[in-house]
Amino acid sequence: MRFLVDTQLPAALARWLRERGHEADHVLEIGLARSKDAAVWRYAQEHRAVIITKDEDFAEWVRRGRPGPPVVWLRIGNSSKSVLLLWVEPLLPLILQKLAQNNRVSQMLCGANSARSASCCTMLSGRVITKSTRALRATHCAKPPLRSRFSMLFSSFCDN
């Protein structure tokens, strides 16, 4: 699988994906760091890459029917590189599975209280399931995210 990591995410994510046998570039590595979203979209489409981003715009483009690459939308707050990679690691097999099934938008959600706690979570039917290094707890979400026929919500969580 080929990935293009967007500018709000660290280049370490692209290196981490390459270490796991995937082709991956960060927009910094290919000279697109200051480019408009349309240029990143075009590059991903031309190179048959999946965009990994924190930018909702790409997911919206897919939802509105714009032809182009698949998008993995990471919805995690500000976090360190190590916390981000810990969060993504157990989700990668599910991401790959959903992409193999031709899902064009994959939405990965995290609602942990603090990125520093290395907590990981996902969204399933309006419930946030959080597993931290201290405890596993489920809390009901006041407002589940808007779902469209193109969006995918996943149910898996970190195994530390």
Image (cartoon, rainbow, N blue to C red):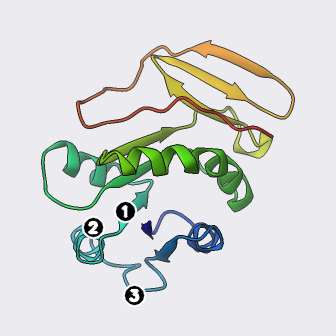
Q: Which residue ends up furthest to the right in the rendered image?
A: 134
Distance of label 3 from label 2 (alpha carbons): 13 Å
Closer-to-camera residue (97/25): 97
Asked whether 96 or 17 is in front, the reply is: 96
Judging by the rendered image, the residue that carries numbered circle 3 is: 31
Identity of the residue drawn at 76% across and 43% down: 118
Q: Nearer the viewer, mark 1 or mark 3?
A: 1
Q: Amino acid at mark 2?
A: Asp
Dot placed on the residue nearer the N-terminal end, 1 or 3: 3
Distance between the alpha carbons at the discs numbered 1 and 3: 17 Å
Residue 99 in percent (x, y) is at 38, 50
On the rendered image, what quadrant is the C terminus found in?
Answer: top right
Q: Quarter holding the N terminus? A: bottom left
The residue drawn where x is 53% and y is 70% is 22
Residue 70 x %, y %: 31, 56
- The amino acid at mark 1 is Val
Neighbours of disc 1 within 10 Å: few (<14), some (14-19), many (20+) = many
CB atoms at circles 2 and 1 under 8 Å apart?
no
Residue drawn 21% across and 49% down?
A: 62
**Residue 89 vertical position relative to residue 39 in the rendered view, above or below:** above
Q: Of the two numbered discs 3 and 2 on the same chain, state the one appearing first in sequence.
A: 3
Dot 3, crowdedness within 10 Å: few (<14), some or many (≥20)? few
Q: Which residue is label 2 attached to?
A: 37
Q: Position of residue 96 (x, y in %)?
A: 47, 51
Left or right: 53, with 150 as reference point = right
**Of helix, strand and loop, which one carries label 1?**
strand
